[in-house]
Image (spheres, rainbow, N blue to C red):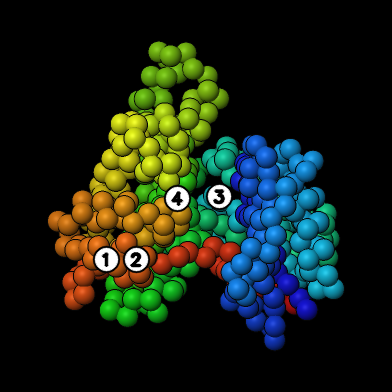
Amino acid sequence: MENIVTLNAGSSSIKFAVFDVKDSEVERDPAIRGQLLGLDGEPVLSVFEMKNGKLREAVRANGVRDLDSAWPFVLGWIEDALSDSTVLAVGHRVVHGGAEYSSPVLFNDEVMSALQELITLAPGHQPYNLAGVSAASEKWPQAKQIACFDTAFHRTQPRVEQIFALPRQFADEGVIRYGFHGLSYEYIAQTAPQNMEEIPCGKIIVAHLGAGASMCAIKGGKSIATTMGFTALDGLPMATRCGSLDPGVVLYLIENKNMSPGEVADCLYAKSGLLGVSNVSGDMRKLEKSSDPCATKAIDLFVHRSAREIGSLAAAMGGVDALIFTAGIGENSPVIRERILEASRWLGFEINREANNAGNRKISKDRILPSAWVIPTNEELMIALHTHRLVAKRR
């Protein structure tokens, strides 16, 4: 049996999945899926059997204190679980591909060097993504290592959506809007026709709402506009990231508050967003349960900014036929979905509260357009499919 392993690493977590390859095709459902969470506290490895969706095991990662010690623990567990199977390839989620990489590529020294140059544009993700490549290469030297980029899906956007109103030389040097969460949007774009028979190729806005949050306008299966830009700081307020910000604020923090660039970066990436506004938590679940008025203000801001971005994306497409919620908040918070749809009623959305509260796929009223939906994303599958296609071409 041959397998494809997918890896998605962050500063405090490692998520993975193992896909079987049968008859030269990737199985749509992973054999196992797991995650090591809590690297900033007490890490626990949880693994799920995907045939029944049940927890296979949850073990404390004794001796794991940081990402360096986490990789041998996680990859060792995967190797033991695969037994006699062969790891054909490892697909890595890489957040930033820059202007050069618009499709999956095989890792080599040149690619690794180029992607390391982009670490400053995605400091919360890129270095951890690349650390996984080194660890997996050491564990499975015979396996191909494939980079799958979160920025690639957005390279179809018109140039007017990509450029900033800066001196032209900067755009020529790659200072443009890249957009992120592309693997998630690509999956939704491919599966939307099956899930939404009413509008197989319509004007769709996808709301990828999680700890990292963004939205994307998709027309004819292609990215037309998105809320994130040069870095993953732009757009919606997120768990700890600020979202859209007047660049003059950055100048003010440096010049008037005497903050160093590093201190500003830490503030914007790790101490802002829902956490900064609420001073309670960056976790929407905790905010929804909190009685603190500042938690309410954080939720209000998130909903308000989401509704504004929906209007902006609808304008970019000249209308909207459907809104799709996905990712952690989008898939699991009926309260946030309802509030965003209510704030977007001017576009024609009419929520079906019973369907929304029940977690149904369609959450808008029948025979009403635009419609609203909840579709779980599957970035792991996109990584596995991209990885297998690239490896198959090279066999």
Q: Which mark is residue 210?
A: 4
Up-down: is 53 above or below 99? below
Q: CA distance from mark 4 to mark 3?
A: 18 Å
Give neighbour class at mark 2: few <14, some 14-19, many 20+ (Cα, 10 Å): few
- Looking at the rendered structure, the kind of residue marked 4 is Gly
- Looking at the rendered structure, the kind of residue marked 1 is Glu
In the rendered image, which residue does mark 1 sit on?
A: 354
- Looking at the rendered structure, the kind of residue marked 2 is Ala
Q: Which mark is residue 358?
A: 2
Sequence-first tag of 2 and 4: 4
Check if mark 1's residue and mark 2's residue have beta carbons within 8 Å: yes
Q: Nearer the viewer, mark 2 or mark 3?
A: 2
Report the residue at 73% width, 72% height from top.
3
Q: CA distance from mark 2 to mark 4?
A: 20 Å
Work out which quarter of the rendered image holds the C terminus and state it. bottom right
Q: CA distance from mark 1 to mark 2?
A: 6 Å
Q: Residue furthest bottom?
A: 23
Q: CA distance from mark 2 to mark 3?
A: 36 Å
Of 101 and 68, nearer the camera is 68
Give neighbour class at mark 4: few <14, some 14-19, many 20+ (Cα, 10 Å): some
